[in-house]
Amino acid sequence: MHEPEVTEALALSHGLSAEEWRTLLERLGRTPSFTELGIFSVMWSEHCCYKSSRVHLKKFPTQGPQVLQGPGENAGVVDIGDGWAVCFKMESHNHPSYIEPYQGAATGVGGILRDVFTMGARPVANLNGLHFGSPNHPKTPALMRGVVAGVGDYGNCVGVPTVGGQVFFHPCYDGNILVNAFTLGVLRSDRIFRGSASGVGNTVWYVGNKTGRDGIHGATMASAEFSEASEEKRPTVQVGDPFTEKRLLEACLELMEKDVIVGIQDMGAAGLTSSSFEMAARAGSGIRLDLDAVPLREEGLTPYEMLLSESQERMLIVAASGHEEDVKSLFAKWGLEASPVGSVTDSGRAEIFWKGEKVADLPVDLVVDDAPAYDRPALERRDFKERLHLDLSTIPDCRDPEETLLQLMGSVDLCSRRWVYRQYDHTVRTNTVAGPGSDAAIVRIKGTSKAVALSLDVNPRYCRLDPYEGAKHAVAEAARNVSCSGALPLAVTDCLNYGNPEKPEVMWEFRRSIEGLSDACRELDTPVVSGNVSFYNETNSEGIYPTPSIAMAGLIEDVSKAVPSHFQQKGDAVLLLGRTDGHLGASEYLWAVHAVEKGAPPPLDWDREKALQKLLRDLASEGKVHSLHDCSDGGLAVALAECCLGERSRLGVTASLQARSHRLDELLFGEDASRALASCSPDIVQPVVNKAREAGIEATLVGTVGGDRFVVNVDGQRLVDLDVGRLRSTWENGLKRVVGG
Amino acid sequence: MKARVHVFLKDGVFDPQGKAVSQALQGLGFSEVHSVRQGKFFDIDTGTVPGEEQEGRLEDYCRKLLANPVIESFSVEVVEP
Amino acid sequence: MKARVHVFLKDGVFDPQGKAVSQALQGLGFSEVHSVRQGKFFDIDTGTVPGEEQEGRLEDYCRKLLANPVIESFSVEVVEP
Amino acid sequence: MKAAVVEFPGSNCDHDAFEWASRLFHIPTELVWHTETHLKGADLVILPGGFSYGDYLRCGAMAARAPVMDAVIEHAKSGGLVIGICNGFQILCEVGLLPGALLRNQGLAFLCQDVYLRCETSKSPFSRHVGKGTVLRLPIAHHDGNYFTDPKTLKRLQREERILFRYVNPNGDVNEAWNVNGSLDAIAGVLSEGRNVLGMMPHPERASEAVLGNEDGAAILRSALKTLEAAHA
Ligand SMILES: Nc1ncnc2c1ncn2[C@@H]1O[C@H](COP(=O)(O)OP(=O)(O)O)[C@@H](O)[C@H]1O
Ligand SMILES: [Mg+2]
């Protein structure tokens, strides 16, 4: 075998820094082979070892009585009582999706599904967070079509409903779209599987698709900036095979019912290398691999290629010895091959053989635990203070609230996401109590009376203007959405998308975000149980806005108490819960109507937020309300309009508001936090108001449900009077302006 | 002109459909089948295009729409000028 | 043998994909495009099949699996016997 | 009265169909793997929805060639009830138990949404207790549901009242805007010549429970069940 000579230059071209290369030589005590260099380059890449983020991620609260498995495994696991648990995680597939939107997004969904079923959980719900460039950017429509079709086709084929998510547009994503995929699975709390290679002599199995030259150096690609050149220099793009994924999923879950599996992990980024090294590291064991046994899709792959390939739909399983036939016959039932490719040792080393030759022999801890970690310099963004300052006197109040409302409802950030989620099967598995279009998706757990509520949120504009406050809002809004459905927020997973961490201003954004997330998760008692960091979302030195996507999972004990987001009943009273201060800073209104991105995000008072969320849950569990809807981007007027736009309900509303000392735009479109709209039968308005007062939450009667018009009076003056059908068509056609059709 | 354009996965790019088809053929008893790769083709009918521009035009269709250059290649063929 | 099999929609069967492609091409400014019909093809690699049986075998693949006779026709071609 | 749900690799509504029959209707129900050769004494066979063989090649093409299909054909030929839902409908067409084929949706996109169906005849075991003219609201979730058949067959289907469901608007009128996948004659479900085999694209099993906000789908299985019970009595 002819291999390049390993030199410092080669190491640098593999993405290692000069300092990392020196450490490696010193710790290894020799020059690595070419294959070994490949292993280090991926395992020490940002994507695999979190070298710029590790020290900061330690700040997250990760514990609580509900946490059965925190960060560190393939996915987190949370107890939901009565012997049941849910397992979930979110992951980014940003770079691959920009290069090949359909396959990139599809394989992103595939990867996160494997992370979850690896833990022994049956996937029951997907979410997806999508951030695209400006709707006017020439690449946006094709990227959007490709990504949405990719997310949909993969999840649809595997049969996991995609029940919610987020879509956001901003020019900061023109050269770096974000595709964040989330999966939640259900399992018995005493049947958690982990990625650990223990038991000397146990067999290491390779199952699933054969290995090709796919995505070699995908992990290193996700650890570097884009440039025009890298758009040209592409590795072989991975193609998703959801049919094989579905069979792998079923076969693994079936095998897990027998007591055969010792450890299991999917081959994600850095494929066979990361799965084998990480499994050995978790168990403190060693591993021996025979590459001759690795099933190949094409001839002539070198050990380097086999170890670094990112071919999809592959798993590594450590099975108790003596069960070889069980493993083989079970996978054969599903038309899949299982190949023994190695065994567990106690050497603490990974020893890799090929054609009778030892091609790699490395200490597992050096590769995994001793991977570099940096506390990179951070520096407050230069324009931070200046942009927090908003001078409203330079911005005219809205003259025609009706027109402004229609403009907002049809804007790309607030309009209906139906074009997207119509392409996602959200009803398969017959658990979807509330799907996309609802504040939180509600998925019942069969065999129990429970349901989980899920919401995915982040407002990148808030995060750009104040990364600390923006991060707090992401968690608070996700929790509020979940509480609106009547669920108790339990735990979060995150997907942290940032620019180049070697830039101090990006690092500052990252650190402030982590602090905000940590504080919020502590306040709301929702530990972080899993997550993912994606750095280097930069093209030609232009970075994205800090985008910490947060997915919150909550629990409803009695699914019959779940509350919808939309008005349900003609004649119902509409109550605004929470205080309106008319905060316009950082708002969607300023951006969509005035093209201004300035001001501080709305202040968030934890006492008030927590009291509101508890009130929402109490109202739900006492069966007092017919609908609850969180009031966030777009403010009160938009939230009121959204309540009229349910898939099934077609009800108008007449609302009467008091401006007090506020400008009209402050009243209608201000984004004060900690607010929600409730609808209830008119005869229990007083008890609801009293209950809110007791909780320290302002409650104001703002209107009545009914009719086919959307009417808003301010101080007795009719400012908005729209046919609900017109409102709906404006709202529903918003995305079509971007994608056509 | 009448033309036929073939669009197919580049060498080395995984073709899950082709793999499934080849397994299905084997399962039907056609054990001689080694491998299958699946592609798309387009039969295109146009108004008059000057002879010397025909192939170029077809390649334009491919580059602009029919083929995804990241994973696919194409070939063009004028059937009736 | 190496073979190529084409499977295409019969005349009269509506082809939503072909129609969308032809509209998209027109939308890109290729106004000369009249119509497009989309089909599938399969590049098949097999072990030895006796020369006189080759075409028949390919037709068997089509009849048994590759084509749906309700909507599709096929043509077979041995590329390398 | 027994039911069987046939499972192919890639089927993903198999358990939904199983629960539909067993949990919601208390019908003793068996899952039957695609390699099996009998149907375990089932009176009603359900071919479930969802991506058998990944929908690779053509939806339902590979499943139609599975060993178990001989038993399904035999069951159908001897008058046994068969319901194919979504992918199950595609399989029934591929195997020739139902006429026609399901092409790609006219807008080319996968569609997941509720649709309205009008029951066109009560002369079938699946609709006897639904009632002609009844409008049902049911979810669809498919990429290839655009029903097609040749003009002669279409005439015959119309004449023999074998079109069981059409896509309609909420008032029950056929209207192209509500025929979302572009099906010929707005066909959403068809019957076999013997009227004992039904194929339909919408998913009644996803809309048969109050907690999911819609129970319209229950009527179809209830009708089949009553018919079978009457026959057994
Ligand atoms: N990419 C997506 N996939 C599926 N559903 C989505 C997606 N994006 C948004 N949705 C759904 O559309 C609705 C509106 O989204 P959004 O405005 O972000 O909700 P909210 O403001 O309540 O957090 C939600 O129900 C959400 O789940
Ligand atoms: Mg919300």
Image (cartoon, coloured by chain):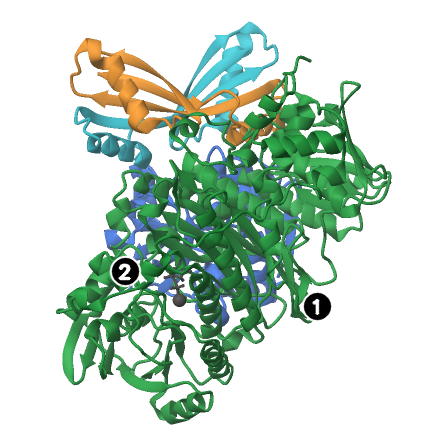
Chain colours: A green, B orange, C cyan, D blue
List x then y, in percent, for residue A741. Answer: 26, 46
Relative to residue D55, is residue A308 depicted above or below? above
Residue A725 location, quadrant: bottom left
Instruction: Name the element at disc 1.
Output: loop
Chain under disc 2: D
Q: Label 1: which residue? A: A83
Residues tagged 1 and 2 counted as in contact (Cβ below 8 A): no
Please indicate, yes or no, whether residue D74 appears anywhere in the rendered image: no
Quadrant containing ligand 1 reads: bottom left
Mark 1 close to ligand 1, CB under 8 Å:
no
Residue A190 location, quadrant: bottom right
Q: Residues within 10 Å of mark 2 (few under 14, many from 20)?
A: some
Instruction: Name the element at disc 2.
Output: loop
Q: Label 2: which residue? A: D169
List x then y, in percent, for residue A602. Answer: 36, 69
For the residues labelled 1 and 2, the Cα–Cα distance comes to 45 Å
Q: Is residue A490 left or right of residue A481?
A: right
Relative to residue D38, is residue A392 depicted above or below? below
Q: Is residue D159 left or right of residue A156?
A: left
Residue A286 location, quadrant: top right
Q: Nearer the viewer, mark 1 or mark 2?
A: 1
